[in-house]
Image (cartoon, grey):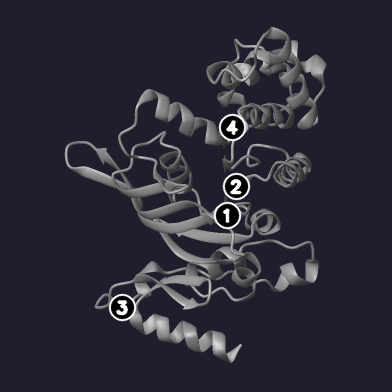
Amino acid sequence: MAAEKLLEVSNLKRHFKIGRKGVVKAVDGLNFDIYQGETFGLVGESGCGKSTTGRTIIRLYEATDGSVKFKGEDVHGKKSTAEMKKFNRKMQMIFQDPSSSLNPRMTVMDIIAEGIDVHNLAKDAKERKARVEELLETVGLNKEHATRFPHEFSGGQRQRIGIARALAVKPEFIIADEPISALDVSIQAQVVNLLKKLQRDYGLTYLFIAHDLSMVKYLSDRIGVMYYGNMVELADSSELYKNPLHPYTKSLLSAIPLPDPEYERNRKRVEYDPTVHNVDEQPEFREVAPRHWVRCTPTEFEQYKKQLVTK
């Protein structure tokens, strides 16, 4: 039985006005789906629109055009306060910088319990306290940490607090916006393993946004590659790494270092030139093989199909 389609993004655009006439097309026509229980990785270099995509999906930004549907319901349609409150409980976000995403004037108890209070998920102070302490232990912290303030913790601990805050309202879908990029390498694996464990325990669905392709491969079921507001390739994680088709994807993969001195001495970077496309043909998102999509022109489409056949 196929997994349920949880999120459907159709022709999503988010443009920002610059000055009187300027426009930055941060997100410019994205199309992808996310299914119940999977981790969808979204990768690309800084400034490609990954974080803007996540923030537009959860409605921190309003969409310029297109639609986002969560379980068939339009996220950006006109909603009452009660409807938005219900939606916000189903979808949560873990932010990139745990230092700036936690209120320094609030204790950990109040930070984590904020969603519990808003959604009336505890009948009294005793239950509220017990729930927060349970969440702290779930993310690998101690219940004694509840009375402390964010500045008393390391970066990895603060990110665990952010994860506990997201879990507090029992969401179905979590957008993790580069949750490990601000952490030491030694801590990154711990946080990623925690996210995987939480997914197994609670049946969560993730949109995992990152620029570290090696970590995305480890965590994601499918991966979408973004370049300047567009999705240029989308495939199952193993397929994308085994058979990258778009030149930009190949460029990103060629930049991944490996702990092999011989490989590193001979590693050749693939440089992506966005001007090589035929200007007379319009690139579109096309399914080159089952579950493998590439933004390409008709001529490139035929070339990519041949590449897959000959491999």
Q: Nearer the viewer, mark 3 or mark 2?
A: 2
Q: Quadrant of the N terminus?
A: bottom right
In this picture, is 56 found above or below 260?
Answer: above
Q: CA distance from mark 3 to mark 2?
A: 36 Å
> Mark 2 highlights which residue?
206
**Disc assigned to residue 278:** 3
> Mark 1 highlights which residue?
40
Q: Which residue appears at 42% of the width and 33% of the height?
A: 60
Q: Hey, which quadrant is residue 152 in on the image?
A: top right
Q: CA distance from mark 1 to mark 3?
A: 31 Å
Q: Which residue appears at 33% of the width and 42% of the height?
A: 63
Q: CA distance from mark 1 to mark 4?
A: 21 Å
- Please state which amino acid type lies under the numbered disc 4: Asp
Mark 4 or 2, nearer chain start: 4
State the SS at label 4: loop
**Disc assigned to residue 97:** 4
Q: Hey, which quadrant is residue 166 in on the image?
A: top right
Q: How many marks?
A: 4
Residues 173 and 185: in front is 173
- Please state which amino acid type lies under the numbered disc 2: Tyr
In this picture, is 126 found above or below 18?
Answer: above
